[in-house]
Image: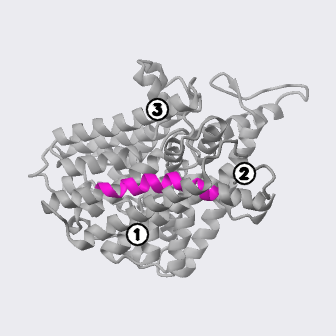
Amino acid sequence: MITHRTQPWRRRALLVVRYQAPVMLALGLALLAPLLLAAWDARGLPTWGEVRSFLLPALVCLSLGLLLRWWLGNISWNLSVTESLLVTTAVWLTAGVIGSVPFMLMLGTPLVDALLESVSGFTTAGTTMLVGLDELPRSILLWRSLIQWLGGLGILLIVLIVGRAQGSNANSLLSAEGVKISSGRLSLNFEKAAVRFIQIYCSLAVLQAVLTTLLGMPLFDSISHAMTTVATGGFSPHDESIAFYRNRPDIYPLYPAIEFVLALFMLAGGTNFYVLYRLGRGQLAALWDGLEMRLLWLVVGGATLITAWNAWSLLDGSFLAWLHHSFFEVASLVSTTGYEIKSTGAFPREAKELFLLLMIIGGSAGSTAGGIKLIRLGILGKFLAQQTRLLRSSSHTVYVPTIDGRPIPRISFDQSIFVLLLWLCYLVVGGLIITLLAPHLPIADAYSTVFTAIGVFGPSFIPVDQVIALPILAKLVFIVGMLAGRLEIIPLLVFFNLAAWRR
């Protein structure tokens, strides 16, 4: 029993353990979906290898979830900010471990590789440790897509719904995970906002699946890609990613339309869900009346034109073809989805340098995209303009920076600077470690792997087989980067700080 008199470290440990119950229950139920697909494909009972890969971890998760729920009971009082951060990180770590089990049981994937695949899925990073995807059972491919769909929705949101957390408990956990419903905020309580979030999320997935199926994509592929597109995750059931359809024009003659639809839905996944909510209510002005949306269109349009011009002037092909390739690539980068119709490393050097910047920038706040977020760049730009203006004004001038007519709190600027510095620290240290562990890689290629990890983008400038061949320590660096990028670093730092548990 947890009371206010319980020692802080014990109280926080019990809180963290208690909040693993709903995520275990949710994942236990999710593990049954690929098992049902395996039975469908086998037209009866699937092989024991497929059964044990999903049934055993499902039974363990459901049993432990029910046991923890019964043992610790419901927590009815508020979580502090520190406790929210601890619970947040623990939930993502638990999800990553559980998600890795099917890969080890079915495919014999080494522990660290399976953990990286799982963490990459739940964080929607999209870096994969698997090759030969086209020959794998559809059940394990569905699991890859499903963990990205759950990760995009937010494991923490699942915790709140399944665990029936309410009030400030729910809001503190949701804020800790970084899934802000809006930068403008929905004028709804948490329960209604969560319902709106799920409705938008599921509607995007269903609509994309319908459109791509009508354009000739197989139903399984449509469902798989719909889950990983709205989650901005990028896992595909094919080694060639979206290029699979382009490379078979006789079977998929409408592949340009498929690519265009996917690009639009990638941008939708990387757009603030508050904007999508307003669009659903017929408010078309939401597409341009906010600073963040104007920045999004500026980045997407400018980067597309620059990349297309650079590739067209140096490589073969028409400008329109490169414009199509560039739009898809930029949409994939800004939303941090990671789909490819042309290898990222196949673009000219100048374009690849721009791609690294796009990986860092990412999408909008309140979306499933990773990256630093456009709104933070807007905040930094506003404060830079403020300092420049003050230098040119008298000492008595008062200038308050605003975004969309609202004053920007000083703490927002401080937090943006802090997150940016932490990102730079990871990029410098992580990149140095990778260059030391893999001296055969060009420096730019080595650093691209840590850019894609913390930017939760996925594909880097080196092929998958070279990523798989990297040492274990390098893969652990990627796992840390993916978690830091998804959680926006601070919760991860708090979790591994002993003082946070004791005070």
Q: Position of residue 257 (x, y in %)?
A: 22, 40
Secondary structure of the residue carrying tag 1 is helix
Q: Position of residue 455 (x, y in %)?
A: 52, 55
Q: Considering only order in the chain, which callout, 2 or 1, is on the residue closer to the N terminus? A: 2
Tell me: 334 left or right of 187: left
Residue segment shown in magenta: 16-33
In reply to whether residue 167 is colored magenta, the answer given is no
* Image quadrant assignment for residue 480: bottom right
The residue that label 2 is drawn on is: 82
Q: Considering only order in the chain, which callout, 2 or 3, is on the residue closer to the N terminus? A: 2
Amino acid type of the residue tagged 2 in the rendering: Thr
Alpha-carbon span between mark 3 and mark 1:
31 Å
Amino acid type of the residue tagged 3 in the rendering: Val
Tell me: 16 left or right of 143: right
* Image quadrant assignment for residue 292: top right
* Crowd tier of the residue under label 1, counting other residues whose Cα lies within 10 Å: few below 14, some 14–19, many 20 or above: many
Residue name at image x 45 percent, y 54 percent? 25
Residue 101 shows which numbered tag?
A: 1
The residue that label 3 is drawn on is: 195
Residue name at image x 56 percent, y 63 percent? 481
CB-based contact (under 8 Å), mark 3 and mark 1 = no
Residue name at image x 47 percent, y 20 percent? 285
CB-based contact (under 8 Å), mark 1 and mark 2 = no
Secondary structure of the residue carrying tag 2 is helix
Closest to the observer, 52 or 284: 52
Q: Position of residue 230 (x, y in %)?
A: 38, 43
Overall secondary structure of the magenta section = helix
Amino acid type of the residue tagged 1 in the rendering: Val
Q: Residue furthest right?
A: 396
Alpha-carbon span between mark 1 and mark 2:
30 Å
